[in-house]
Image: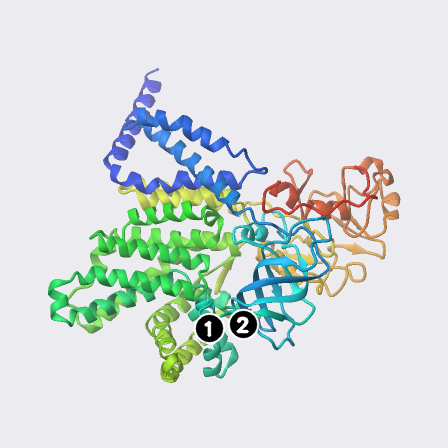
Amino acid sequence: MRIVNMNKMVLFSSLDKALTALFVQRDRWFLWLPVPFSLGISAYFGRLAEPSPWMAPIVLLMLLPILWIKRGSLMGVALLVMVLIAGGFAVAQLRTQMLDTVMLSHETGPVTIEGRVVEVDALPKGLRLTLDDSKLVGGWTYRDEPLPTIVRVRLKAKDTAVPQAGDVIRLRAVLLPLSAPVMPGAFDFQRHAYFTGLGGTGYAIGEVETLRSVESGGDFFENLRHAIRKRLEAGIEDKQTAAVVTAFLIGETKGISDENWEMIRQSGIAHLLAISGFHITVVTGALFFLVRALLALWPYAALHWPIKKISAGVAMGGAIFYLLLIGSPITAERAVIMACVVMIAIMLDRDPFSLRLAAFAALVLLVAQPEALIGPSFQMSFAAVVALIAFYEGAARHWLLPDRDRNVIGQAWVYLVACLLTTVVATVATAPYTLYHFGQVPVLGGLVANMMAVPLSSLVTLPFGIIACLLMPLGLEAIPLWITQESMRWIIEVARVVADWHYAVLRVNSFSAAWLVIFTLGALWICIWRGWWRWLGLIPIVVAIVGVAFTPRPFLIAADNGRLLALRDENGGLWLSHTRREKFIAEAWLEREAASTAHQPAGDWRTAEAVGVVNCDSRACLFTAPNGKRVSIVYSPETVVTDCDSVDLFIAPEARLNGDLCPSKRRQMIDMYDLRYGGAHALYVKPDGAFEIRQVARERGIRPWVPKPPPRDKERRKT
């Protein structure tokens, strides 16, 4: 009895200490506000069906009066958390309803469309146009469905007429629905496109006819971006270097070859080509210090004007102008919002580099674009920002602050050490999100590449590139453009060398988003709180790492069209059924599910056996699942009758299966219709040895961004 009482006393004493520490750090409570708001957004996107539009508002109306009564108490804190969760849910649902993007659900066949060009992308072969205000010439003739407002059409490589942004054009094209996830849990491009307004894609089959050219003073920023791209291509001899410089300065990445893209990704410097926080920081910071220095040279302005606040206002305007110039990508929008928050803080005499401002910026972004929460840009940018602020506001500020007594060598050494620590902290903070979204993260090679590329690009490549762009109207861009070109060539050469290193990147297989959430909560606990108890956040981090390590892997993956399958061998490698079919899907599978090894048989499974992994003949391919059960991939339905008693699961990716062929295995059949209407399938083995069949349609549910399936064939088998 005494032992029980002592345990209770220890427990209550620990709780009392925890509550005391919690109340001592009340100034840090505000930093947690984006967390429950984000949980509400996640709850909305995690649903399988669209909720009632009144559910979240009713919950808010019920909680707000109680919150007002209980304010200032622990019950009030709990109610505030519930209000924020409901608020995040309501904001995400409202955003979805306001967009109401029309999503193409089927191929149109050859149609004539008219639309206004809003974006022209240069591809390695040809061009790609994004059309707004699209409409069909002659009306819709199939299923009486409306045409999406925004469509993306790829032009033929031989087309010589290049329309400009703002032109109204007419062309003959075939429109296609956007691609669904390549497997359960993979990136949902349809959901991403829904929130950008894109409803379909396609390719032109005829010449482009310009109905109305853009008038002078039309889409100024698109035309300016097009003019800069042309001058960069003309001023840089090597086309691939020109493509990389163009991507680095104005965000047009479509001209970079696949080989260079893979090299840049392997070296860990791909973030330099995604215009986001790095570019906006350099542009805003350069403008701020330049304007402040020029005003300081004028004695009257230095004595009578608030030059620091004026510089912040000019820098904020420059960041917005640069955002419009590069086409307002979502990643840059968030960076500009963050930069504007920092500049406003300077204008209000507040500390611009604090976790409080980061939390405020996160709330602003999530209210404006709640869908950003589930994207890699938001997650990685705020992970880096929060980790760096927490690091530098701690012990690092005591020995990294610039010292006026240091000589030039000492200041340069501190700068290099700061760059190294910044790279390490940012890499570690963003690694889980990079692994979740892209399956790989730069390690040793990425660290070395960033240590060389980031200082050079921030001090030389980007500043001289901007100077070259500013001098283009005068025709004086040759010298700064040459400096930009040579520095970029050096960066590319570093990336080429580092990409071949054995430890350049770390790869992992895909894992559940739940582990990412657990890791995030642990990391936030460490970054936000102060004192010894902040290190309790290591517990969920370790749990998440263990969970990722023991995430089950599918032993078979089947594409939604049945044209590609993959089998996993005992070593974890994937064997693809074809090497020339569905290359995009194959690459996505290998990136997500084959971190260690990947095998591609020389031909069709029916003509070449995959080194004992599967045995094939002209009618079927037979293999043994990890649970010891036999699985048959059949290409002739008659095979089901002969193998009914000896096979546990039948898969017919290109044929129909009738349950009467094998009544005892009716529920253990997957045919072409299951793939067509259920989407890509992934097969797992449960701990009890039974099969677990996951399909894309079942996990996505019925949501606004999920197009309606095509009409079912009248001969669909009965289930």
Which of the numbered marks, if any, corresponds to residue 255? 2
Q: Is residue 587 left or right of residue 458?
A: right
Screen quadrant of the N terminus: top left
Question: Is disc 2 in contact with disc 1, using a CB cutoff of under 8 Å?
Answer: yes
Type of the residue with mark 1? Thr
Q: Residue at x 34, y 20 (%)?
A: 3
Residue denoted by label 1: 246
448 displayed left or right of 308: right
Residue 314, image quadrant = bottom left
The residue drawn where x is 38% and y is 60% is: 277
Q: Visible in this render: residue 421?
A: yes
Mark 2: give few (<14), some (14-19) or many (20+) Cα within 10 Å.
many
Please, what secondary structure does the residue beneath circle 2 have? loop
- Residue 381 in the image: state x and y as whole percent: 40, 55
Under mark 2, the amino acid is Gly
Please tell me whether residue 296 is drawn above or below residue 527 in the rendered image: below
Please give the name of the residue rendered at 33% of the width and 23% of the height, measured from the top-left corner.
7
